[in-house]
Amino acid sequence: MHRRRLLGLLESYLARYPEEQARVERIRRFVETHADCFERTCRDGHVTGSAWILSADHRHVLLVHHRKLGRWLQPGGHADGEPDPLSVALREAREESGLAELAALSEEPLDVDVHAIPACGHEPAHLHYDIRYLLVAAPGQELRRSEESTALQWFERRRLTALLTEKSLLRMERKTRAALAARR
């Protein structure tokens, strides 16, 4: 079963974050009941992968200003048939930032989220079942914005709570602080 790896990741994630049981169970149920969960043609929604990218010194996080949604978000996107969400997160991070050298701090997700995507053009409203990873960029790389965004910018992590109101972004930042503290 091509979904087995993701289901295992969700089980491991739930063991680390039992307080997120409702969100994890929602994703698990979706994955179990939709054999096409990794395809954007799945009308109810689809699995996506995204990246919380830190600068090499860990002081900044890279965000994109999403063209369609009009908000600052982490890079990420559709699985397009790829059942490994870390591979999806790495691919999308590279495509949306121009950063070729990225390393995952863990093969375990940093965060998971379910969010609604509004209808746009021929695409109906649907849900993204997002599996998110903590990545670090090698130093000295030049950023290159993709067509999917209007801007691409490094933000000081210590100022994020003053700049952002998006709960899931702030949640990723809190988890990042904890993950980095645990590595010391």
Image: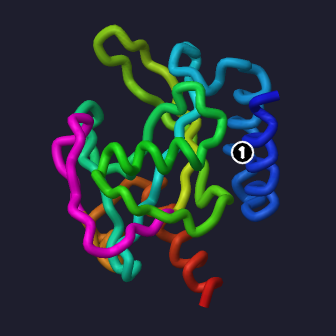
Q: Is residue 31 above or below residue 49?
A: above
Q: Amino acid at mark 1?
A: Val
Residue at x 54%, y 32% (from the top left corner): 79
Part of the protein shown in magenta: 135-153
Which quadrant is home to the C terminus? bottom right
Q: Is residue 8 magenta?
A: no
Residue at x 38%, y 13% (from the top left corner): 123
Question: How far across and down, in percent of the image, does residue 151 sit?
Answer: 18, 49
Q: Which residue is the extreme one toward the bottom?
A: 184
Q: Is residue 49 above or below residue 175?
A: above
Question: How far across and down, in percent of the image, does residue 101 sit?
Answer: 40, 62
Give the labeled residue for mark 1.
Answer: 24
Q: Which residue is the extreme one toward the left?
A: 150
Q: Is residue 11 above or below residue 103?
A: above
Instruction: Please tell me in which quadrant of the rendered image residue 22 appears.
Output: top right
Residue at x 76%, y 30% (from the top left corner): 2
Question: How far across and down, in percent of the image, does residue 121 sit?
Answer: 29, 12
Which quadrant is home to the N terminus? top right
Answer left or right for 136 relative to 155: right
Name the secondary structure under disc 1: helix
> Of 123 and 142, which appears nearest the observer?
142
